[in-house]
Image (spheres, rainbow, N blue to C red):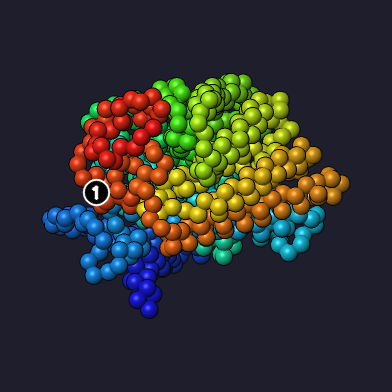
């Protein structure tokens, strides 16, 4: 009963109540104003203002804005540290808390929940696609499910990036917390209302635009389309606020002696991703906001019948949405580079090149967006330049692959679960990398565009670039977060189910695409000969789902029953492993000094950080 009581008074519950109240307030306020002016009934303006009000209501009732409101009226509330008084420590994870580790865990748990929801959507429409004809879904229901799957999975990955960056970056650079703890809490809690709006859109008409929301289709859809556009738009505030903290932490809070080229390599990936989030998110926000304004107030931006330019939306959208792929991938590749030296017991080969390649990928990512538009009708003169810049992305990405292979060469490799997922990530990301230039080259992209080849390529890129590294990261830092070791047998079972399952799924999707299977369709002609392939893809998807269920069970069961483990079970040189597990409230008892290289394993060189000798592992 006490657990239920704490949930009923948690920030989530209070926030959702405030969200409902303020949504109704905004919606009916606008409707009353329109009725008084004699305007025709149109729910779109009310939904727009109601959604904006709902975010404010959620933040107010959850307590995210309390300290800022006190500051506005002249009070200076102290920054609270530690668990809440008179309540169990676990309740800080269901309420507003300013500690970066709590926020990182909140990001992670929410991201895993959203990931499971998105996966459930995929399993549902995969069952529909396993046979020609419509089995149990309607066309509209299928369109909504695959559209929701796309945006929900993207949101889950962004939350996962937030989890790793928030929890690890301050620890890795020797900071006690982020420089703006309240803004950090805001960046997490402001992500919850958009998730609710997107899920609510599914029950008020859904949307059939895909996750991209292309006009003119998005201008004419049901009211669910409006909620989807608004949820997508409002989620951007989370990305921008989070990126500010990551950049400031790296710029101003590094430990003494930690020059840029002495930082752990994951920090470079997180920093590069944050730079993209800060600079690119505004453009997708503009495209989504213009669509909402066109729906709500009759403005003309994208409707060609009224003089608008639908291709303008695509340029604005993809200027963000291609770089955002690297927001997913760069932290994931950082995890691979971070873990390989630990489990190979070797120096990371070409550290500076790896670090600079992350910035290179981030920079070139801004110059390739129009390869998504080779068949859109844009000016022919733009195609060749964008094809060339797209192929340039292979250079900094290739640098990372060469480094990984050289790091593994003649290493003393051990195959614990994190290392298995790192190796699996390399193999899967290689599939995504090899199939990418085929879509970046105009002659081969033209027949494959909008086919299932793209589905296979995109899933390989996302799973290899983020999902597999994310699982590796969770297993690797699980003892640091909980002080307990996960079940190794269940971890390896998770791996050996997921990797072959994904290979079958991804290769099957690309095979179906070559055969002529189009993406974003609910049915297909049996004459294509892809029915057997679709059955294999569906079976593989369920194998992956079972592996994720095993993973979730492993996390929960190990947190409850596993014995406490060595504070540094991996014998890592990294600074986060030189403090207690779980990590103390302010991370380190005293400021440490960086005196060596982060990945000098097996060299007999000094430790990376100058701390008490008992805390420094051997080679």
Along the horizontal axis of the image, is 485 left or right of 63?
right
**Quadrant of the rendered image containing residue 453:** top right
Image coordinates for residue 248, horizontal then vertical, percent: 29, 37
**Quadrant of the rendered image containing residue 143:** bottom right
Determine whether 58 is above or below 235 in the image.
below
Residue sitting at x 38%, y 55%: 564
Residue 297 seen in this snapshot: no
In the displayed image of the protein, which residue is found farthest to the right?
527
Determine whether 220 is above or below 613 in the image.
below
Along the horizontal axis of the image, is 526 left or right of 321?
right
Q: Nearer the viewer, residue 64 or 346?
A: 346
Q: Nearer the viewer, residue 323 or 555?
A: 555
Q: Nearer the viewer, residue 478 or 439?
A: 478
In the displayed image of the protein, which residue is found farthest to the bottom?
1
Along the horizontal axis of the image, is 40 left or right of 448?
left
Image coordinates for residue 137, horizontal then vertical, percent: 71, 62
Residue sitting at x 28%, y 62%: 63
Element type where label 1 sits in the image: loop
Quadrant showing the N terminus: bottom left
Residue 156 seen in this snapshot: yes
Q: Pointer 1: what residue?
A: 586
Residue sitting at x 30%, y 63%: 89
Image coordinates for residue 47, horizontal then vertical, percent: 46, 61
Image coordinates for residue 82, horizontal then vertical, percent: 24, 58
Determine whether 370 is above or below 306 in the image.
above
Q: Report the number of discs.
A: 1
Badge 1, how many Cα within 10 Å: few under 14, some, many 20+?
some
Residue sitting at x 85%, y 50%: 526
Quadrant showing the C terminus: top left
Along the horizontal axis of the image, is 476 left or right of 453?
left
Q: Nearer the viewer, residue 244 or 5?
A: 5
């Amino acid at each position: 009963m006490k657990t239920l009581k704490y949930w009923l008074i948690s920030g989530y519950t209070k926030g959702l109540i405030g969200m409902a109240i303020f949504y109704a307030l905004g919606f009916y306020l606008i409707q009353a104003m329109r009725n008084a002016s004699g305007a025709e009934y149109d729910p779109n303006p009310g939904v727009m203002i109601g959604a904006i009000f709902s975010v404010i209501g959620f933040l107010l009732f959850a307590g995210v804005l309390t300290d800022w409101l006190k500051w506005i009226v002249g009070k200076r509330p102290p920054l609270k540290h530690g668990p809440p008084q008179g309540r169990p420590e676990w309740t800080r994870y269901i309420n507003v808390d300013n500690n970066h580790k709590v926020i990182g865990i909140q990001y992670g748990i929410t991201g895993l929940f959203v990931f499971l929801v998105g996966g459930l959507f995929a399993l549902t429409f995969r069952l529909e696609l396993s046979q020609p004809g419509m089995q149990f879904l309607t066309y509209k229901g299928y369109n909504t499910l695959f559209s929701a799957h796309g945006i929900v999975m993207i949101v889950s990955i962004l939350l996962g990036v937030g989890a790793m960056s928030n929890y690890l970056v301050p620890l890795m650079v020797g900071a006690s917390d982020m420089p703006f703890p309240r803004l950090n809490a805001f960046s997490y809690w402001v992500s919850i209302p958009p998730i609710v709006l997107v899920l609510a859109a599914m029950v008020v008409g859904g949307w059939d635009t895909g996750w991209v929301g292309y006009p003119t289709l998005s201008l004419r859809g049901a009211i669910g389309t409006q909620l989807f556009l608004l949820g997508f738009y409002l989620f951007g505030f989370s990305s921008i606020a989070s990126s500010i903290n990551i950049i400031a932490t790296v710029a101003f809070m590094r430990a003494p002696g930690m020059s840029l080229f002495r930082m752990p390599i994951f920090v470079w990936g997180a920093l590069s991703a944050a730079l993209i989030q800060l600079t690119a998110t505004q453009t997708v926000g503009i495209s989504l906001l213009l669509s909402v304004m066109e729906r709500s107030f009759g403005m003309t931006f994208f409707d060609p019948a009224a003089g608008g330019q639908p291709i303008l939306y695509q340029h604005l959208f993809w200027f963000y949405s291609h770089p955002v792929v690297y927001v997913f991938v760069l932290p994931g590749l950082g995890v691979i580079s971070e873990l390989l030296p630990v489990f190979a017991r070797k120096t990371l080969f070409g550290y500076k090149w790896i670090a600079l390649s992350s910035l290179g990928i981030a920079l070139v990512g801004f110059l390739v967006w129009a390869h998504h538009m080779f068949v859109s009708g844009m000016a022919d003169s733009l195609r060749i330049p964008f094809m060339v810049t797209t192929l340039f992305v292979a250079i900094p990405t290739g640098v990372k692959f060469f480094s990984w292979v050289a790091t593994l060469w003649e290493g003393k490799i051990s195959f614990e679960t994190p290392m298995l997922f790192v190796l699996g990530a390399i193999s899967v990301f290689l599939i995504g990398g090899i199939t990418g230039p085929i879509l970046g080259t105009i002659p081969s992209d033209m027949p494959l565009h909008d086919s299932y080849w793209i589905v296979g390529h995109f899933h390989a890129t996302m799973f290899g670039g983020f999902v597999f590294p994310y699982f590796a990261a969770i297993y690797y830092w699980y003892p640091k977060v909980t002080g307990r070791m996960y079940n190794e047998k269940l971890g390896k079972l998770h791996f050996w189910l997921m990797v072959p399952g994904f290979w079958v799924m991804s290769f099957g999707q690309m095979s179906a695409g070559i055969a002529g299977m189009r993406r974003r369709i609910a049915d297909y002609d049996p004459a294509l000969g892809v029915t057997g392939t679709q059955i294999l893809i569906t079976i593989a998807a369920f194998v992956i789902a079972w592996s994720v269920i095993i993973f979730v069970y492993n996390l929960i069961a190990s947190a409850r029953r596993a014995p406490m483990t060595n504070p540094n079970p991996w014998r890592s040189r990294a600074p986060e492993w030189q403090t207690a597990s779980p990590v103390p409230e302010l991370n380190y008892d005293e400021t440490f000094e960086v005196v060596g290289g982060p990945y000098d394993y097996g060299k007999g060189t000094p430790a990376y950080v100058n701390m008490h000798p008992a805390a420094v592992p051997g080679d």
